[in-house]
Image (cartoon, grey):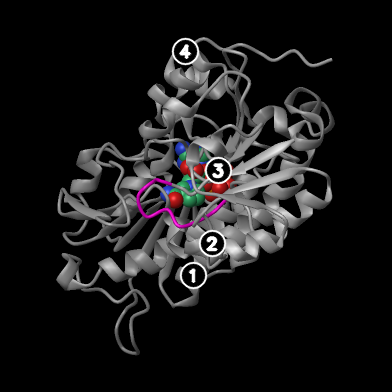
């Protein structure tokens, strides 16, 4: 199969969907790999490194889009919709519950699209996890940075100093991103509370993170109580495939301290607050209800080297199976890929996405 690797066009997206080592692996398995010139630059991978790995480096995006299997990092942006075509296989982050227009394009054009974030394995999300680990760690770094007065923050240093109380970090959702945010917040000495809805997960978090991190069952009242003295609020909730649960409204944000910071990691699924709207690394923050909001949809794009290596290490076995067998067979040998399949042959094949968008769901019948 021919496999195309594009240079990402989304603003400040520096990741690439395949390392040169990955290209070599696929080439050795008998596939041809096309890489758009400059695609790996942000991650420190030169065109020459791809050529030495046996890939063909081409200038034009249109040539890459002709490949049987197009592998990307982020969802296609509007300027790329024209390249979508029937029978094409697209493997990338999609976050369709937050994007009705892209969903309609993929369905209308008959693209077989597999979303990294809904591929499952033993109840986990193996292709979302590495990016959530990075975004979780970044959330406390970025949030602590914007607490500085000159960014409109309240001037609290999260770790405190001897004789001064540390800042308080409240994390909504204790999955992969939430736990990684807690690890960093705990590491710098902040007070940390994780609000979760899954009792078993809270037991696990308590055991792993120890008594410096409190866990709290997720209810509106519990969240409202926590917000009053929170300096950094992190949104990290997820219901796979669906729009992010809206746990916060304007009034709740308004009850927070002036200059508190809210990092909504869940913005890629639409955000967990009424006040959240997508931002970019170029212009990452805005202020609403006196709270600094950081809502960058592609946080790991800022640390492209680490992110690219983490992402491709996990996607490579899936890329190989899809390239070896085609989508319809691949989903039978790797059933988690079926959860990843969001559109196929003019059908919307992910139920959570269909429910979130109020669109018709159609199931792929596998034999
Ligand atoms: N902005 C970015 O650049 C970026 C990068 C990576 C991940 N993400 C996003 O971060 C979010 C979290 O991803 P993850 O991998 O940590 O997911 P995860 O599935 O590992 O964790 C989500 C957690 O949210 C909890 N949850 C769900 N509903 C809840 C509720 N009402 N109250 C409290 N907890 C609730 C779940 O029980 C689960 O533990 C996703 O939306 C993901 O797409 C964003």
Point out the tag, 4 or 3, that comes first from the N-terminus.
Answer: 3
Point out the tag, 1 or 3, that comes first from the N-terminus.
Answer: 3
Secondary element type, mark 4: loop
- Label 3 vs label 2, nearer the camera: 3
Residue appearing at x 67%, y 29% in the figure: 339
Whether residue 172 can be seen here: no
- Counting other residues with Cα less than 10 Å from the Cα at mark 4, is it few (<14), some (14-19), or many (20 or more)? some
- Label 1 vs label 3, nearer the camera: 3
Q: Residue 189 lies in magenta, yes or no?
A: no
**Main SS of residues in magenta:** loop
Question: Would you place residue 184 above or below residue 131 in this image?
Answer: below
Left or right relative to 27: residue 246: left
- Label 4 vs label 3, nearer the camera: 3
Q: Which residue is mark 3?
A: 72
Q: Position of residue 212 (x, y in %)?
A: 51, 70
Point out the tag, 2 or 4, that comes first from the N-terminus.
Answer: 2
Residues at marks 2 and 4 touching, judged by CB atoms closer than 8 Å:
no
Q: Which residue is mark 1?
A: 184
Q: Which residues are magenta?
A: 9-17
The label shown at residue 359 is 4
The label shown at residue 142 is none
Label 2 CB less than 8 angstroms from ligand 1: yes
Residues at marks 4 and 3 touching, judged by CB atoms closer than 8 Å:
no
Question: Would you place residue 183 above or below residue 116 in this image?
Answer: below
Point out the tag, 3 or 2, that comes first from the N-terminus.
Answer: 3
């Amino acid at each position: 199969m021919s496999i195309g690797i594009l240079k990402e066009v989304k603003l400040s997206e520096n990741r690439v969907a395949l390392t040169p080592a990955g290209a070599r692996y696929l080439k050795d398995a008998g596939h041809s790999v096309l890489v758009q010139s400059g695609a790996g630059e942000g991650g420190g991978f030169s065109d020459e490194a791809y050529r030495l790995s046996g890939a063909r480096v081409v200038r034009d995006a249109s040539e890459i889009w002709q490949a049987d299997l197009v592998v990307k990092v982020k969802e296609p942006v509007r300027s790329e919709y024209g390249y979508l075509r029937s029978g094409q296989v697209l493997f990338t982050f999609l976050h369709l519950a937050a994007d009705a227009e892209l969903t309609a394009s993929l369905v209308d054009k008959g693209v077989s699209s597999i979303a990294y974030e809904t591929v499952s394995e033993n109840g986990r999300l193996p292709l979302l996890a590495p990016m959530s680990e990075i975004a979780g760690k970044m959330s406390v770094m970025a949030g602590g940075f914007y607490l500085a007065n000159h960014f409109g923050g309240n001037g609290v240093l999260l770790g405190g100093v001897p004789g001064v109380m540390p800042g308080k970090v409240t994390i909504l959702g204790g999955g992969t991103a939430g736990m990684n945010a807690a690890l960093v917040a705990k590491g710098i000495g902040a007070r940390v509370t994780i609000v979760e809805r899954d009792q078993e997960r809270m037991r696990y978090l308590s055991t792993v993170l120890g008594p410096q991190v409190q866990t709290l069952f997720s209810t509106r009242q519990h969240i409202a109580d926590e917000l009053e003295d929170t300096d950094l609020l992190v949104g990290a909730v997820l219901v796979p495939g669906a729009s992010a649960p809206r746990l916060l409204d304007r009034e709740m944000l308004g009850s927070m301290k002036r200059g508190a910071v809210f990092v909504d990691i869940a913005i890629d699924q639409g955000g967990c607050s009424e006040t959240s709207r997508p931002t970019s690394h170029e212009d990452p923050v805005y202020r609403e209800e006196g709270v600094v909001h950081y809502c960058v949809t592609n946080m790991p794009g800022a640390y492209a080297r680490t992110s690219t290596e983490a992402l491709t290490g996990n996607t490579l076995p899936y890329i190989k199976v899809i390239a070896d067998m085609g989508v319809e067979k691949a989903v039978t040998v790797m059933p988690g890929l079926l959860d990843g399949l969001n559109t196929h042959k003019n059908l919307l094949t992910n139920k959570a996405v269909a429910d979130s968008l109020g669109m018709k769901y159609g199931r792929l019948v596998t034999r």
